Amino acid sequence: MPELKLDSLQKGRFGDIVARHMEIFEGVILYTFLFVGIYFQVFILFTYLVSRKQIKADGNRSFELGKYPSVAVIVPAWNEEKTLAKTLDSLLNLAYPKDKLKIVVVNDGSTDKTAEIMEQYKKIHPQIETFSKENGGKHTAVNFGITHTESDLIGCLDADSFVERDTLKKMACVFENPNVMAVTPAMKIYQPKSIVQMIQSAEYVFGVLVKKVMGLIGAIHVTPGPFTIFRRDVFTKIGLFRKAHNTEDMEIAFRMQANHLQIENVHNAWVYTTGPSTVRKLYRQRLRWTHGFLENAKDYKYLFFNKKYGNIGLITLPVGLILIIGVLFSVFFIFYRIVNWLVTKFIEWRTVGFLRPHLSFSFFYVSTRLHIILIVSIYLLMIMILLSAYKLAEEKAGKNILLYFVLYPFISPFWVIKSLWNTAFAKKTKWR
C-alpha cells in the first residue's frame, strides 16, 4: 500500500510540473504573438494616419499624361468561357489611347469555348491579339505573352477579373518616376453574394489600406495577378515569371525586392476579382497562397532581418511568418485547454456527480488579466484599421465586417495549419 500511495503522489507531482511548464510556455508564446500583433497593427495605423495628406494628394492628383507609354495587357486564359468576355470588355473600355494599348489573350490549352470567344473578339477589335499554346500553367502563358510584345509597360489581368475605366491611366502616371519598376492596384471582390465572398470583401478592403502603407515604406511582397503593371526593364533585368510553388506573382515581388527594384501601389486604381464562393474553394485558394508564402520565404530566407533589403526583410516577412506560426500555437493551446477542461469536468462528475451550472453575471468576475486586455486591444485596433480602410476604399462599412470578425478566425486556421504541414513535409499544393 505505501508503494502505491507513493506512486500516486509522484504522478500527481509530475502532472503539476507538466501543467506548470505548459502554463509558462503558453504565456511566453501568447505574449510574444500578442506583442507582434499589436506592434504590426499600431505600425500600420500610425503610418497611415501620418501619411494621410500624402495619400489624399496621391488620390486627387491629375492623371493626364504628357506622353502615354505603350502598354500590353496579357490575359492568360484556361477554361474561362464564363468570364473572359466580361474581362475583355473591361479592358476595351479603359480610358487609354487605343493606339497605345494592346490586349494579348493567351489560351493556355483550354478545353471549353475560350478559344472561340477570344477569336470572336479579335475579329471585331484590332487592339486584341490572340495566341494558343499547350497547357503549361499560368506563368508559362504570361511569359509567352511577354515574349510576343514590345510595349514599354506590361500588365497581366486574370480572366476572372475586371478593371475600372480610369485604372490604367492612374497606374501609368506613377511610371513618370523613372525609379518605379512596378505598380500594384487596389483590389475588391466583385459583387459578393455568398457569406464566404462577403468575408473576403472585408478582407480585401482591409488589404487596400495595408498595401498602400506597405507601398509607402517599400515593403510590398506580392504583385497581384489581377492587373499589376511592370516596366519592361524588370524582365530584362531579373528574368520572366517562374512557377514558384504556384504563386508566381509573389515570387517575382520577392525577386524584385531582392534586386532593389521599386514597387508602388495606387490605392484608388480599382480592380475587381471574383472571389471563391464556397468554403472549400476558399480553402484551396488560401492554402496555395499561404503555402506559397512559406516556400518563397524559404527560397529568399536571406532577406529576413537584413537591413540591406529594407522593410521587406525587417517588417513584412518576419511579421507574416510570426503570425502564421502564431495561428498554429493558438490552435494547439485552445485544443489543450478544451481537453484539460473536459478531463477536469469528468473527474468532477466521477467525484461529486453532475452539478447544474448556475448562470449569473457580475462585473466582479470579468477578467482583467493582461492577455485579455491585449486581445481586446487587438480587436479594437482591427476595427479602427478596417473603418479607415473602408473610407480609403470609398466603401460603406456594413455586415461584411461583422462576418469577417465572427467567421474568419474559425476557418483560417485550417489552411494555415495545412500549409505549415505541407511545408514541413515537402508536400505540394495544386492550383485548382
Image (cartoon, grey):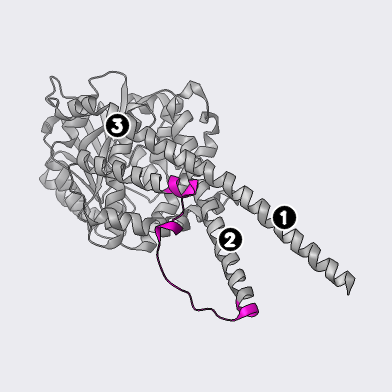
Report crowding for label 1: few under 14, some 14 to 19, many 20 or more residues within 10 A (C-alpha): few
Judged from the image, the secondary structure of the residue bearing numbered disc 3 is: helix
Q: Which mark is residue 205?
A: none
Judged from the image, the secondary structure of the residue bearing numbered disc 2 is: helix
The residue under label 2 is 336
Q: Nearer the viewer, mark 1 or mark 3?
A: 1
Does residue 425 sit above or below 42 in this rendering? below
Which amino acid type is shown beneath numbered disc 2? Answer: Tyr
Residue 199, horizontal then vertical, whole percent: 30, 55
Image side of residue 234 versus residue 367, left or right: left
Q: Quick one: 403 or 30, which is closer to the camera? A: 30
Which amino acid type is shown beneath numbered disc 3? Answer: Tyr
Q: Quick one: 306 or 297, which is closer to the camera? A: 306
Query: Magenta residues?
Result: 349-375
**Of callouts 2 and 1, which one flags the residue occurring earlier in the amino acid sequence?**
1
**Of callouts 1 and 3, which one flags the residue occurring earlier in the amino acid sequence?**
1
Residue 272, horizontal then vertical, whole percent: 22, 47
Residue 280 occupies quadrant: bottom left
Q: Kindly identify the residue that appears in the image at 10 percent across and 46 percent down.
A: 124
Distance, label 1 to label 3, CA atoms, is 46 Å
Residue 394 occupies quadrant: top left
The residue under label 1 is 17
Image side of residue 56 versus residue 249, left or right: left
Quarter of the figure with the N terminus:
bottom right
Q: Quick one: 209 or 81, which is closer to the camera? A: 209
C-beta proximity under 8 Å, tags 1 and 3 = no
Q: Kindly identify the residue that appears in the image at 44 percent across and 34 percent down.
A: 316
| Furthest residue in direction bottom, as rendered | 353
Q: Which mark is residue 48?
A: 3
Report crowding for label 3: few under 14, some 14 to 19, many 20 or more residues within 10 A (C-alpha): many
Q: Kindly identify the residue that appears in the image at 37 percent across and 46 percent down.
A: 138
Judged from the image, the secondary structure of the residue bearing numbered disc 1 is: helix
